Image (cartoon, rainbow, N blue to C red):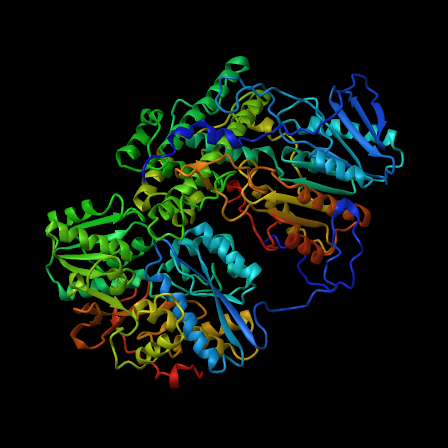
Amino acid sequence: MSRITRTPRLIAAVAAVAVVGLALATLPAQATLRNEVGVTDSSVTFGITVPMNGIAAPGYNKVAPAAQGYLDYINENGGVFGRKVTLKIEDDRYAPATAVSKTNKLILQDKVFGLAGSLGTATHLAVLKSINPGKRGIPDLFVSTGFSGFDNPKKYPTTFTYLPSYVMEGKIVGKLLASKFPGKKIAILYQDDDYGRDGLAGFKSAGTTFVSSKGYASGSQSSPGLGAQLTAFKAAGAEVVVLFGVSSANGIAIATAAKLGFAPQWILGSVGGDATTLKALGIPAALINGAMGASFLPSTSDDKDPYVVKFKEINEKYNKGKDKTWDNNILVGMNMGMTLVTALRAAGKDLTRAGLVKALEAKGSSFATAGLVPFGYSATSHAGYTGYWFGAYDAAGNLVPDGGKYTIYTTDSGSGAVVTSTYVRPAMPANAIPNN
Amino acid sequence: MSNRITRRGAAILASSVLALATTVAIPSVANAADPTCDTALGITSCNGVGSDGAAYSFSAPTNFGGTLYLWSHGYRYPVDLPAAIPVVGGYKVTSTPEPAPSTDVAKALLGSGFGIAGSGYSKQGWAPELAVKSQMEVVAAFKTKFPSTKKIIAWGASEGGFITQLLVDQNPGTFAAMAPLCTVSNDIGSSLDYATDIVWGMQTFFDPTIVGHGYAAGLAGYAQAMGDIGKIFTALGALQAGITVGTWPETAKASPLAANLIAAGIPARSALLMVGLISGLPTQSAHFDGTTGPGDPSNPLNQDYDKFALAISPALGVLENLANAAVLGIVVNYDLEQQMGGKILDNSTHDYVARVGDAAGTYNMALSGDAAIAGMQGVLKLAPKWTADAAAVAKLKTLKSTSGKVVIPTVTMHSLNDPAVFAGNTQWLTDKYLASNSATEMYASFITAGPEHYTQFTAAGLPDTSYPIPTSANHCNFSSMQMLTVAWMANYGAQNGVLPDAFITQFLRETIPGFSTDDMLETPLLKIYG
C-alpha cells in the first residue's frame, strides 16, 4: 500500500512557501479529523458504476435509477436513522478502465461511504485489481454479477455479491433439464469468458451433456454474428438450446434461428432473459413464448406478491429514470435499494464501514427482501442469493413459475447438491420500509 | 467496421517514440579540467569537463542561498541509430550536459536562489556507476566555485533516478534530500525482465526472424540489433494497419505456432494485447487512452464507439507503448550484452499464464474470449524460451543496485502508465519504505495520470496523433508545475530533515493538475516481483 504517513493531523498554520512559485496560501487552516467518509448525521452516500450508455446499456441502465427511486422513497419516509441515503450513479459504458476511473471518482472526489450494486464482471475485476476496496475498508456491496470468483472474503473482504452465482444457475438449470427434457438433445451457447465458464462448470457438475457446445467472444455476437453456432446446433439435431449469454447475444441467437427455420425449446439464462430488454432489441414476445428461464425474485407479473405490488407503486412515483417500464431490471434495482437500506439498519445508528460489513456477515442471510431464496452471507461467504426457481415465458413475455407455483432450488458454487429450498421468505415489512 | 487506420502507418508510431535525449540549452562545453564561467543577468554559469571526459555544467544566481539541485539525466542511446530504421532512425549519440530537467524548471530554480548542476556523463547507455563518479566531480567543482553551498539535493529521471539513488547510497552525508523521478529501481535486471517479455513476445507471435538476444560482438551485433528494431516496427506498422480487422503481419506466418492462431481466426490485435499483458505494458499510451472509440458516444446509433473502445482501444495503447519499450529494450540489451560478454535475457522460468492473471477477465473481449486466450497461452507455453549465459548473468549481478533505503527526505514521482520504465519501479521503492516502518515523514510519492479521455479521432474516424501528448501520459512527461512541486518538497526536506506534513502532501496532490489524488494508490509491481 503506497499510502504514506496517512495519519491525519491538525495543522495550525502553514508557513508561506516562497520557493519556485508554489502558492500554498489557500491551504485550509486546519484539516478535519474524520474517521468515516461519506456519512454524516443526516446523510450517507453510496456510489455505483453501471453501463448507462453503450452496447451493454439496454436493460442494465434501468437498475440504478430504480434503486435510486426506492432510496428516494425511503428518504421521504425519514431515511435510515435520520440519514438520507444517496446513490451516485456513474456510467462506465462497460469498459474496465472507465469503471476504474469512475470508481476512483466516487471514492476520491465524491467521497462515498461505499459502493453498492456495481455491475459487470470484467469491469469489477478491474476495479478490485486497481483500487482494491477491501484494503481501503470500503464496503463493496451487492455486485451485480454472478461470477463466483467475487465471493472470496479473504481476497475481497468487503465485497458482497448480489446475484446467485452462474455456477449455481448452471447446476440448477442442469438438474431441471434432466428432469423436464430427458433424452432430448441439448445444446448450449455461452459467452466465452468468466460468465460462461462459470455456467459451464455448473452444467458439468449437474451432469448435463450437450450435443453441441459453442461459445462466442464477448462483443462478437453482432459481428461476425452467431450464424455458425446456430447452424451447428441445428445440424446436431439439438432439440433444446440453452442461451447463456447477454441479452443482445440471446436476441441475435433467437433471430438467427428464426431465419434458419430452427425452433428448438429455448432455455434463457437469467442474465439475458429479460423479455422487455429482448423486445427492445427487436425480439417480440411471441418468439420467446414457451421458452424457459430461471429467476430468484418473484415473477414481475405476480400481482399477488407484496413486493412486486409495492415496488411497482414506488416505481411509478419515485423512479426518475428515462425508462421506468416495469420489468425484471426495475425489480432487481428496487430490491437492491431495499437490501441496502436493510443492511444500513442492521449496522445500527453509529454507522461505520467496518460495522456495515460485519452486519451483513452476521445478519444478511436473514434479511427480509423480495428474494425467494436467502443471501449466502456469513463471515466465510459473501455469496449473494443462493438459488432459483424455474419458469416459462408467457405470451406477454412474463416469466411465470413452472406448474403455477414457485419451486425454489438452492445449492452452492461448489460441489453441494441441488436441493429444494425450505426457505420461508420473511414477511415484507409494512410499506416495504425495513424495520429490522 | 472497416479497416481505416491503414495509411497512418509509421506516423502514429513515430509521433510518440521517446525523446530520450531531452536537453536543456547549455553554453558550449569547455575543454579544460577547470570550468569556464561567465556571469550575465545575475547568473553565473560554468562549463567544464571531468577527469573522465564527461562534460558538465552548473549555474547559480547572485543571490545563491546555499542549496544545489544536482540533476541526473536519463538513458540516452549509446549508439547511433541508422537513418534507414523507420521512425527512430538518424539518432546521434550525444553527451551534452544537462543541469536541469527543462529550461523552464532551470529558470524557476535559479530565479529562486538555487544552484543547478549536471553532467552529460562520459558514457551513454547503461553506465550508472560512471555517472555517479561524474556527478560527484560536478558537486566538487560546484562547491569549489560556490563555497557557501550547504545543502545538495539529488534528483533525476529514468536512469537518472537510478543514478540519484546510487549517489545517495554511495555517498552518505553528501545529500540532504533526493527525488528519483520515473525511476529505475533495484537493478537493471528487473527492468530487463519486461524487455525480455516484450521482444520475445514479438518474436513468438509476429516475426520469428527477430534475433532478440545473443547479439554477435561488435558491428555484426549492432547490425542485428538495429535489424530487430526495424523488424519490430515493420510488424507494428502492419498490426496498426490492420488493427480493426485483426490482420496479422506477413512475417507472422513463418511461425508455426502463430500460424495456428491465424488459422483459428484469432485477431492479431488480441495477440498484441497479450504481449502487453505478459510484460506489464499499460493499455494507455501517449495518444491512446485505451477506452475511447470514434464518433459521438451519446449517439445510440453509433455502434462503432463501444466496439472500438472495448475490443480495439486497449491493443492500440499497447501498440504505441510497445513501440517505445521495444526500441529501448533492444538497445539496452544490446548495450549490456556487449558489456557482459554474453546473453543476459532469460524467460525460461516465466509463468505467462500467471502473469496475465485477472487481466484475462478484464480484457476478455479485447483478447477475443476464453478460447482465444487459451490458444495464445498455449503458444506462450510451447514457444522456445530464452536462456541466458551464466557467466554474463553473474557479471550483470555485479553491477550496482539501489538499496531502496530511505535515509534522507525522498520524493518520488511516476506516471501511472509509463510505457518505458513501469511505475512498479517506484512502487518497489515505496514498499521498501513502508516495510521499514519509519516513524518520520521521510518519503512522499506522487503518481501522475493523464486525463480519462484523450484519444482523438479524425473526421474519418482514424486515430489522430497530431494532438500534443497530454501531460502525465508517456514516460517522464511531467509538467513544470509538477517538477517544481517535487523540487519544493525536496527542498523542504533538505532544510528541515523531514518532508512536509502528510496533509500538505495530500493538499498538493489535490491542487496540482495531473496528480492522482489517491494517497493509497498502488501501482502494479513489475511482473518479476509477482
The total of numbered circles placed on residues is 0
Residue B322, percent across and down? 48, 33
Q: Would you place residue A15 above or below residue A114 in this image?
A: above
Specify the quadrant of the image occupied by residue B143: top right
Rendered residue at 78%/51% (across/down): A17
Q: In this view, does A380 lie above or below B263?
A: below
Tell me the quadrant of the picture where the N terminus of chain A can be found.
Answer: bottom right
Q: Is residue B150 among the parts visible in the rendering?
A: yes
Where on the picture, by quarter, is residue A372?
A: bottom left
Where's the C terminus of chain A, which quadrant? bottom left
Tell me residue A303's x, y (percent): 26, 80
Q: Residue at x 70, y 29 (%)?
A: B24
Query: Where is residue A277 drawn, in percent x and y?
Result: 28, 62
Asked whether, in this view, residue B378 is left or right of residue B443, the answer is: left
Camera-side residue of B504 and A295: B504
A407 over A239 or under it: above or below: below
Residue B350 visible in image? no
| Farthest front residue in view | B459
| Observer-nearest of B453 and B269 | B453
Q: Is residue B156 above or below residue A175?
A: above
Q: Which residue lies furthest to the right in this view?
A: B147
Q: Which residue is drawn at 53% across and 57% down?
A: A105
Residue A192, percent from left and from top: 30, 49
> Residue pushed farthest bottom?
A430
Picture quarter containing residue A296? bottom left
As rendered, which of A321 and B78 lies closer to the eye? A321
Residue in front for this viewpoint, A66 or B330: A66
